[in-house]
Amino acid sequence: TWVRLAAMGHYSSDATMPLHTTINYDGQRTGNRGIHYRFEWWMIEQHADQIDLSPVAPLLVTDPLDTAWEVIMRSHDCIDTLLAADTELRRSFREPTPNPDDRHGRGADAEFDARLFDRLGELAVRRMELAAQFTAGLWYAAWVEAGRPNLSGVPAPPPPPPCGNATKVTISP
């Protein structure tokens, strides 16, 4: 059950990411190569202390498929804004320079990403808030569809296993 809920959370959140709704998922067709990782990861990682996600009520999901398509279409509507900001920054500032120490070869360019965050940070925060709303709405709709079972005896999910060199984290109940 927990794995299914986690998968639902992952994929419903993915639907709120504009670049997940297009064949031009990394700007490779428009001269914006690398925008996916910069928008979804690097500019967020570098500015996490400036992001204040506000608790939001779950979306009311009466038809999961219709709601999913509405979220996808609204996400898709953000692509032009996202690519235009990246294009304008490349023209007025410079091309991003990946960090050579990044093992994936698509690392952060702190100065470029800071300027991108100035232009797109609010959009990114709104998309993350929508991801939480949508996921919570789907979970709530599933609970209602299941007959609103009492969950008081359901054990908490197990903590994730440590990865690679990560230190073990103890999660209190």
Image (cartoon, grey):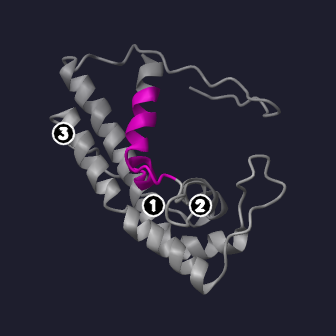
| Most frequent secondary structure within the magenta stretch | helix
> Residue tagged by mark 1?
125
Which of disc 1 and disc 2 is earlier in sequence?
2
Residue lying at the far bottom of the rendered structure: 92
- Residue 132 quadrant: top left
Q: Is residue 28 magenta?
A: no
Q: Is residue 8 magenta?
A: yes
Residue 87 higher or lower than 93, as above or below:
above
In the rendered image, which quarter contains the C terminus? Answer: top right
Residue 66 in the figure: left or right of residue 51: left
Which of disc 2 and disc 3 is earlier in sequence?
2
- Give the residue at x 40% y 55%: 18
Residue lying at the far front of the rendered structure: 29
Residue 66 shows which numbered tag? 3
- Give the residue at x 23% y 30%: 141
Q: Secondary structure at mark 1?
A: helix
Magenta stretch: give its range.
6-25
Residue 160 percent across, percent down from the top left: 63, 25
> Residue tagged by mark 2?
33
Q: CA gap, disc 3 to disc 1? A: 24 Å
Residue 18 shows which numbered tag? none
Question: Which amino acid is tagged 3?
Answer: Asp
Q: Residues within 10 Å of mark 2 (few under 14, many from 20)?
A: some
Q: CA gap, disc 3 to disc 2? A: 32 Å
Q: Are marks 3 and 1 in contact (CB under 8 Å)?
A: no
- Give the residue at x 22% y 34%: 65
Which of disc 1 and disc 3 is earlier in sequence?
3
Q: Secondary structure at mark 3?
A: helix
Whether residue 23 is visible to the viewer of this picture, yes or no, is: yes
Q: Are marks 3 and 2 in contact (CB under 8 Å)?
A: no
